[in-house]
Amino acid sequence: MTTASHKSNRQRPNGFTLMELLIVISIMLILMLIAIPNFNKMKAQANETSAINSLQAIYKAQIQYQTTYPSNGFACQLSALGGDPKQGVPTPTSAQLLQGDLPAGIKAGYTFNITNCSKVTVNNTDQITGFEVTAVPQAVGKTGNRGFCIDNYGEVKSDPTGGTNCTQNIQ
């Protein structure tokens, strides 16, 4: 009698069966395939927002640069707006107005550049009177979809193709 009761009360081993593990892994893969494209879209949107904010920070730094160094006008290189405060007092080539990655021209999947500098010569010194700052995605469709521009009037515009032909107003 004890032998028969042992066979009918056979205990199941601890843990999961191979079939149960395969089902769980399959469900996880399906969820990941659904989530990854949405994550990439959200990351591209976040990069675009960061690019617009960075353009506005560069614009504000340009206004401050023009006020601090009126004989130079605006800066025509991002590196002139940067600089390390530990290196001493600010200068026209290292104004210490922008910190972090921005003076190097790369931030959050975008490449920044000051272009279209217009100048006049006053007392044998070039004075920059106008500029445009561009922000283009490093990989269109991945790090961002649109390119952005801001000029010395402070208006941010976009290029829906990811380039520098900024003609559309930002909403």
Image (spheres, helix red, strand yellow):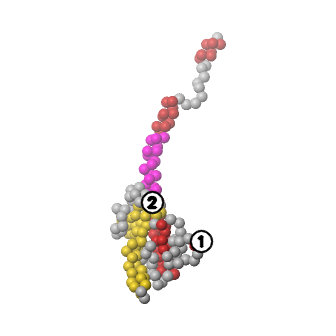
Q: Residues within 10 Å of mark 2 (few under 14, many from 20)?
A: many
Taking depth in this image into account, of 76 and 124 the one nearest to the observer is 124
Q: CB of mark 1 within 8 Å of CB of mark 2? A: no
Residue topped by disc 1 = 86
Question: Does the segment drawn in magenta span residue 22?
Answer: no
Taking depth in this image into account, of 59 and 95 the one nearest to the observer is 95
Residue furthest bottom in the image: 123
- Numbered disc 2: secondary structure: loop
Location of residue 90 (image quadrant): bottom right
Question: Residue 109: x and y, percent?
Answer: 45, 60
Residue topped by disc 2 = 109
Q: Quadrant of the N terminus?
A: top right
Mark before the other along the chain sequence, 1 or 2: 1
Instruction: Name the residue located 47 percent from the left edge and 63 percent from the top edge.
Output: 107
Instruction: Name the residue located 38 percent from the left edge and 79 percent from the top edge.
Output: 118
* Magenta stretch in the rendered image: 28-45
Instruction: Name the residue located 48 percent from the left edge and 84 percent from the top edge.
Output: 70
Query: Would residue 171 be visible to someone looking at this image?
Result: no
Q: Give the overall secondary structure of the magenta segment.
A: helix
Q: Which mark is residue 19?
A: none
Amino acid type shown at disc 1? Lys
Taking depth in this image into account, of 120 and 145 the one nearest to the observer is 120
Cα separation, mark 1 vs mark 2, equals 28 Å
Q: Residues within 10 Å of mark 1 (few under 14, many from 20)?
A: few
Question: Residue 162: x and y, percent?
Answer: 37, 62
Give the total of numbered labels: 2
Location of residue 163 (image quadrant): bottom left
Amino acid type shown at disc 2? Gly
